[in-house]
Image (cartoon, helix red, strand yellow):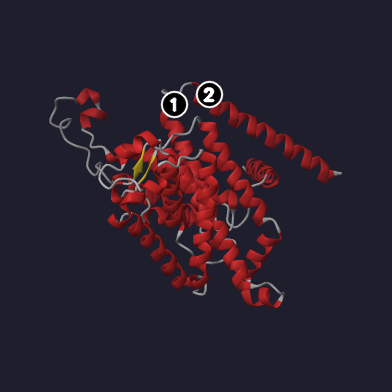
Amino acid sequence: MEKDKNKKRNLILTLVLIALIGIYLGALQADTTAHSYAITIIERSSIYAVAAVSMNLIIGFTGQFSLGTAGFMCIGAYVTGILTIPIKMRDQIYYLYGMSPIIHDIKLPMIVALFISAIICALIAALVGWPILRLKSDYLAIGTLGFSEIVRAVFGWEGFGTITNASYGVSNIPPFANIFECVIICAVCIIIMNLLINSSYGRAFMAIRDDDVAAEAMGINLFRTKQLSFVVSSAFAGVAGWLLAIFMRSAVTSTFTVALTYNILLMVVLGGIGSVSGSIIGAFLVTGSQEWLRFLDKEYMFSDIFKNLSGTAFGAMKVPLLRNGFRMVIFSILLMIVVLFWNHGITGSKEVSWNRTINFFKRLKGSKKKTEVAA
């Protein structure tokens, strides 16, 4: 009885939360000019959440240290750009190399490009995974990171200029119609991955992560299961690339560097390895923090802060340290503080749920009452 009551309560709370998010997004969409900055942060965070969950699928749930996410995002982004940019603009974009006549007149709807991006990334992952998944630990990380850099080098090579436009990349990709389109697609992708994790396949992934010898003794095919996890993770990384290309309206190799891989890995570790909700929180927290701290990259005069001192010798001095790049110094310090207090990530390996949230506030209220009584 109590269990059914909790389920009903959780369902109502979930629906209320979805409604509140919908109202907030609707308010932002109603005036995109005034709320363009907030819309940008939400869309970027949602896209990185998909990439973080896809990385967590292979690292946190299967225990395979793969760092090839940026490479598959690059593939997904370029496939999207090549297939969706307006035909009449292709000669202007490919003015240096000219676009290959084989693909010049092929233009597909965005949703079709999404599935093609995912399928191509999955096929490449299946081929690459055959030799590379036989490696373990750091060697697997180095191998997948090397693959990511090879993808960047190939896409930026002049020999493929008629397809990828080399280092110039592709531009004028049609944007999202509204913020709902981006957020809903990201939410659907995360829900699908979460359903997979909670299925029998997901339990096989976690069995390999916990003890691959015991998993094999139970009849789990280690290589096939690892390959399945790698293929699914890569397919959704390709979808994240599809989303990022539409968000940025371009695809350039300089976007998908090693720094992007490490940034996504940071989201996974900060949120909690082996937690879907942790990856989502990590994505929003890291992206939001990096944006909110941008004011630290500007050189301020003391007179800008203390208006009444304007024109004095003191007011003419610059605030020390505040300059381009200082934002990342402060961000790194904040990360170190978070890791010191939550060394397993914000959520650990657990998922955020209504039951845990309510119990947390109950414990917090109980400890407050005890403190008041003791005082």
Residue pointed to by mark 2: 27
**Distance (Cα) linking label 1 and label 2:** 9 Å
Report the number of numbered marks.
2
The answer to whether the residue labelled 1 contacts the one labelled 2, judged by CB atoms less than 8 Å apart, is yes
* Amino acid on which the number 1 mark rests in the picture: His
- Among all residues in the image, which is located at the extreme left? 313
x, y percent for residue 292: 39, 38
State the quadrant of the C terminus. Answer: top right
Q: Residue at x 48, y 36 (%)?
A: 42
The residue lying toward the viewer, choosing from 19 and 184, is 184
Please say whether residue 143 is visible from this viewpoint.
Answer: yes
Residue pointed to by mark 1: 35
The residue lying toward the viewer, choosing from 131 and 10, is 131
- Among all residues in the image, which is located at the extreme front? 101
**Crowd band around label 1 with a 10 angstrom C-alpha radius: few (<14), some (14–19), many (20+):** few
x, y percent for residue 121: 50, 56
Q: Residue at x 50, y 52 (%)?
A: 237
Q: Residue at x 54, y 57 (%)?
A: 233
State the quadrant of the N terminus. Answer: top right
Please say whether residue 55 is visible from this viewpoint.
Answer: no
